[in-house]
Image: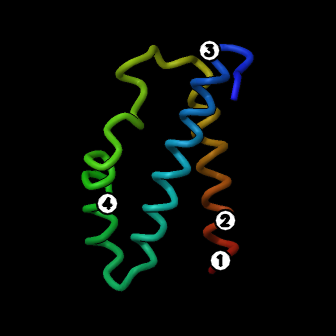
Amino acid sequence: MRFASRDELLAQLWLRSIRRFHEGFVAALTGPAPLPSAATFLPRYCRAHPTDYIARAAPIPGWIDEVVATASGVVLDEFHARS
């Protein structure tokens, strides 16, 4: 797959990372012990996906907050639709 620009590539990587994180986090919240599962999910996720946090390797573009908010909203809408 080719990307039109570096910004587009970074946006797609952020979206993939956010979706992966939110899917796992929502799954942790829907399990039998949601609070402990959610609390331990973040460190487990970070250890399992060390390269997903691309901000360490590249400057954070100014539009990233909008991308995060949009992706978070989509994941939350999907979660509410399942409930």
Separation of residues labelled 2 and 3 (CA atoms): 29 Å
Q: Nearer the viewer, residue 35 or 11?
A: 11
> Which residue is labeled 3 in the image?
6
Q: Earlier in the sequence, mark 4 or mark 2?
A: 4
What residue type is disc 3 on?
Arg
Q: Residue furthest right?
A: 4
Separation of residues labelled 3 and 1 (CA atoms): 35 Å
Q: Nearer the viewer, residue 66 or 45?
A: 45
Relative height, residue 43 to residue 23 (above, below): above
> Which residue is labeled 4 in the image?
41
Quadrant of the rendered structure where residue 11 is? top right
In the rendered view of the protein, which quadrant contains the C terminus?
Answer: bottom right
> Which residue is labeled 2 in the image?
78
In contact (CB < 8 Å): disc 1 and disc 2: yes
In the rendered view of the protein, which quadrant contains the N terminus?
Answer: top right
> Which residue is labeled 1 in the image?
82
**Residue 56 image offset from top left, x and y in percent:** 35, 22
Q: Is residue 19 left or right of residue 74?
A: left
Separation of residues labelled 4 and 2 (CA atoms): 19 Å
Label 2 element class:
helix
What residue type is disc 4 on?
Phe
Q: Residue furthest front?
A: 1
In contact (CB < 8 Å): disc 3 and disc 1: no
Label 4 element class:
helix
In contact (CB < 8 Å): disc 4 and disc 3: no
In contact (CB < 8 Å): disc 2 and disc 3: no
Disc 3 residue crowd, few under 14, some 14–19, many 20+, Cα 10 Å:
few
What residue type is disc 2 on?
Glu
